[in-house]
Each structure stands twice: as structure tokens, then as C-alpha cells.
Amino acid sequence: MRKDYHTHTYRCKHAEDPEADVVAYAAVAVQKGLQVLGVTDHTPLPALPDERWGRIRMNLSELDSYDQAVEEARAAYPELTILKGMECEYIPEFTSFYREELFEKRNFDYLIAGNHYVPYDGGWVSVHYHLKSKEVLMAYADHMVAAIASGLFAFIAHPDLFGNSYEFWDEHAIECSKRILEAAAAYKVPLEINAYGFRKPPIKTKAGTRPPYPLPPFWELAAAYKGITVVANSDAHQPKDVGETAAVERLIDQYGLQRADLAYLEKSARCVNHATRRSCG
């Protein structure tokens, strides 16, 4: 059964198709033979003191249209299971918003943690550009562990995103990875191998040119941990990329990683515990 749990519509403000809504993604999913499509735009947030989040996520005022777009796509393609989700920054002060507004009020099926910013030295730094030192890399690891431990998220999106700005696979990268992997194994939270990194321009490092992520040595290390499960997703930002996960599926097979069972997400949201996102039975 083909599934894709990580896709974005135009509301994220950085989609590669600036007009495509859920129904366009659903149409491609059906054409490609997918049975499950998860829609996970970057979540809006309540009022913030600056613009660090607003440039790359939907506006709070768009939540109603997002709900409506999911329902319209479900009506148009009843043969496809369409799950309503959000990709969230883990910000402890907004966990009540995630629980009360998204899960309880709007009946979201799931949330995923996609950390693009890290709290460091009294502010927030970008994972894409500013993970250049051991200290910031360890701050990233700590932030990821906290997200995993929160119990809010069905899985952790692109946990190896640090490879976008941390150039080396060295003892610090290994330590960072081990912290994330140990937490994921302990809390039994799946990790995503994200295909979007293979579609992005390669980055130049002293060791040569490589995709920004996924990081093969991260996933090779993951294979050594009992209890680690993974999910392959497209992270599509345009309809044509829905279901394009073959490259990351090969990584899963290469390292003998265990695929996560996320079938519980396909049940009614009322059969899922909103506090932990685990099946009620």
C-alpha cells in the first residue's frame, strides 16, 4: 500500500506550485496509485513578537480554508484516504494551541515535528544556515529530543536536517545523531527519511558534493538501534512530487531499517488519544 504522509499546499508560502491546493495533490496521488495522502502544511501560530515563523507558514486566518480544502478533496476523491495534519515547530509555549485548536477544536488527524529553528543563546537560529559549531549542533539535538519526548507528534520530520548547514560527519555530528536516535528508540517515535533533500540542489563540502539531506551515515547509524522505525515521505511542495519516495525507500532497504506502522492515523481521530497520538485500541 502506497502512502505519503508529508505534503504542502500553497499556504506554506514557499510551495513550488503557488496555486495548488489539496485537491490537486489528491488528484496526483490517485493517478500514482497511492491509498493514503497526508496533508501537512506548516502550522500557523498565535501572535508572535517577530517574523521568524510567518515567512514560511500559513497565516492563522487560513485555517478555515485549510479545513475546507481537505473536506473538498475528500469529497472529490473518496477512494483516497486523506489525512489532515500540520508540520509544527516544537515550541513549548504553543503546545496548548496544538492540542486545543488543532486536535480538539478542528479534529486534526496528526501533527509532525519539523524543526527548522533552534533555541540558542537567548534567540532562535535557522537549522538551514546556522548549525556551524558543536554548541549549536548540540542545541539542535536537545531541541529534537524535547520534541520527541513531548508526545505530540506522529513522527519526526527530517531529523537529519542539520546536514543542510553542518558540513562534516564528525564526532559532533555522531553525538548529535545518537542523542536523537536514543530518544526516538526510547519514546518509540518514528523518524522520517525525507525525499525533498534529494530534489534540492546539492551542497559543496570539503569532503565533496552531497545532498543536504538525507544523510546516509545518520541512517546507517540508526540501523544499529533497536526500536527505531522510519517512514519515507516526499515532502512534496508541488503536486507532481507526491509519492516520489523511491530514493529514500532504497535507503531503508540498504540499511535494513524497519518501516513504521502508521495505520492508526487512518482511523477516526476520535479513536486516537490526542495527548499522545497513540491508538485507543
Image (tube, rainbow, N blue to C red):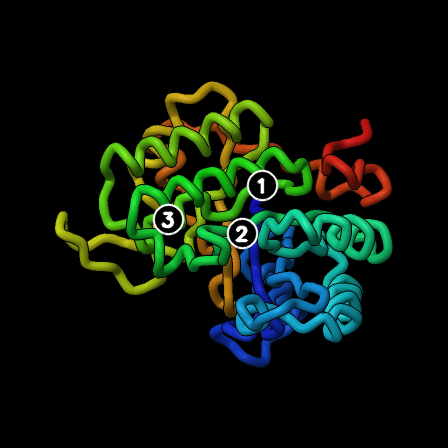
Q: Nearer the viewer, residue 220 or 1?
A: 220
Q: Is residue 139 above or below residue 171?
A: below
Q: Is residue 119 above or below residue 171?
A: below
Residue 209 visible in rendering: yes
Tell me the tag on residue 114. Answer: 2
Q: Which residue is mark 3?
A: 162
Tell me the tag on residue 147. Answer: 1
x%, y% of residue 216? 30, 40
x%, y% of residue 82? 70, 55
Q: Residues within 10 Å of mark 2 (few under 14, many from 20)?
A: many
Residue type at the position of mark 2: Gly
Residue type at the position of mark 1: Ala
Q: CA distance from mark 2 to mark 1?
A: 9 Å
Earlier in the chain: of badge 2 and badge 1, it is 2
Residue type at the position of mark 3: Phe
Q: Is residue 251 above or below residue 163?
A: above
